[in-house]
């Protein structure tokens, strides 16, 4: 029998040392395509279930989770991530987001700054405690909260579990090829895309494990956590793995809750502090620490500009 043409490519790739198709990936690939192009919700999760169980998660619990009708295969996060990485490699990221500067500038509008100041006033006790604990001024915390989630109004319209599980399930580029902008996949970008697809799949798998553990410790259903397009959660938009590294149980109720202002805002302060924010920090270092929070020059400039406006209304213009 003639193999499926995509399967043929994978089998050929196995013979090339530069582009190995591991036995694990091949098994996932074969099972996946037994069901493709069936509807996305009918995708076979068993390779992912087996991997989670092998990593120590309870067999019955994981099977119950994936049997839930809420679990859906959502390939758009991986396809958008790969498209973004290819554009970034081609230095087309700015061109691909011509409205980014306009969007970030919108955070400097007077009514938006007034809302941020009101939020800072309402949460003064929390912000004062963060400032005394981590030396991070309240206006910086509120600025990040504004840019990340519009002060908690926009927590993402994705299901974090579905996002991360779907990315984890698709280590092979061919699994998401039907959902990609085909004009981006060219001979000079294909190997790069294959490599990054596997890398991001493995990253998402580890974040999925962290999400399940975060849900367990915080006492919430892992299938009911809203997230961004790449699985960031909460007011602070942390990846789930950050819960154990930077999460703070500020209200001391025994759980870290990224959807509670006290825990989320303290976690932002802790993140900045652990990434170099000190009591005597200079402007250059401030930029570097904010950049560590979100690797975007425009993001870091915007956060600091908004923080300046919240603090004193000063005309801290964004650099061009
Ligand atoms: Ca707590």
Image (cartoon, grey):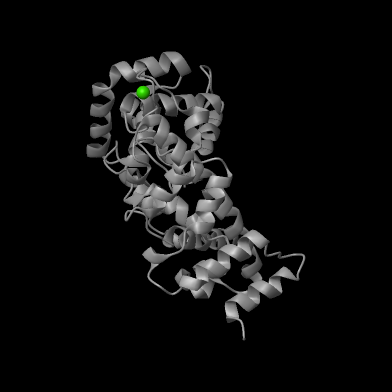
Vertical order, 147 against 66 (above or below):
above
Check the image and report above or below for 153 versus 186: above
Is 92 on the left-hand or right-hand side of 43? right
Q: Which residue lies furthest to the right in this view?
A: 17
- 135 in relation to 46, above or below: above
Q: Which residue lies furthest to the bottom in this view?
A: 1
- Looking at the image, the residue that sits furthest to the top is 132
Q: Is residue 65 left or right of residue 208?
A: left
User: Residue at left 43%, top 43%?
Assistant: 61
Q: Quadrant of residue 2?
A: bottom right
Q: Can residue 30 be seen in this view?
A: yes
Q: Which of 74 and 49 is in front in this view?
A: 49
Who's the residue at 67% across and 65% down the image?
21
Residue 201 vs residue 315, the one in the foreground: 201
Tell me where residue 15 sits by quadrant: bottom right
Observer-nearest of 289 and 37: 37
Q: Position of residue 126 (x, y in %)?
A: 33, 19
Give the percent coordinates (x, y) of residue 156: 33, 47
The spot of residue 205 in percent (x, y) is: 53, 49
Q: Is residue 106 above or below residue 94?
A: above
Question: Where is the N terminus found, in terms of image quarters?
Answer: bottom right
Ligand 1 image position (quadrant): top left
Is 271 or 276 nearer to us in this picture?
271
Q: Judge left or right: residue 204 versus residue 188.
A: left
The residue shown at (68%, 73%) is: 11
Residue 239, percent across and down? 47, 40
Q: How many labels does the image show?
A: 0
Whether residue 295 is visible here, answered yes or no, is no
């Amino acid at each position: 029998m003639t193999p499926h043409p995509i399967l043929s490519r994978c089998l050929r790739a196995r013979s090339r040392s530069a582009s190995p198709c591991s036995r694990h990936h091949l098994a996932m690939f074969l099972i996946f395509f037994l069901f493709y192009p069936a509807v996305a919700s009918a995708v076979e999760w068993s390779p992912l279930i087996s991997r989670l169980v092998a990593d120590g998660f309870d067999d019955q619990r994981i099977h119950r989770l994936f049997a839930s009708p809420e679990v859906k295969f959502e390939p758009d996060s991986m396809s958008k991530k790969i498209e973004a990485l290819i554009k970034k490699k081609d230095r087309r990221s700015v061109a691909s987001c011509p409205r980014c500067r306009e969007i970030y500038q919108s955070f400097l509008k007077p009514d938006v700054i007034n809302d941020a100041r009101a939020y800072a006033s309402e949460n003064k006790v929390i912000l004062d405690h963060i400032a005394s604990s981590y030396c991070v001024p309240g206006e910086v915390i509120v600025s990040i909260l504004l840019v990340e989630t519009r002060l908690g109004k926009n927590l993402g319209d994705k299901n974090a579990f579905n996002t991360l599980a779907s990315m984890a399930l698709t280590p092979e580029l061919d699994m998401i090829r039907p959902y990609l902008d085909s004009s981006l996949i060219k001979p000079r970008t294909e190997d790069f895309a294959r490599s990054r697809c596997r890398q991001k799949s493995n990253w998402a798998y580890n974040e999925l494990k962290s999400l399940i553990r975060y849900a367990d410790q915080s006492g919430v259903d892992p299938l009911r956590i809203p997230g961004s397009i790449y699985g960031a959660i909460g007011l602070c938009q942390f990846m789930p793995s950050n819960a154990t590294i930077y999460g703070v149980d500020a209200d001391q109720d025994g759980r870290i809750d990224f959807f509670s202002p006290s825990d989320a805002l303290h976690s932002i302060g802790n993140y900045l502090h652990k990434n170099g924010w000190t009591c005597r920090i200079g402007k250059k270092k401030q930029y570097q620490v904010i950049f560590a929070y979100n690797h975007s020059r425009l993001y870091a400039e915007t956060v600091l500009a908004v923080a300046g406006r919240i603090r004193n209304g000063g005309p801290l213009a964004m650099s061009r």
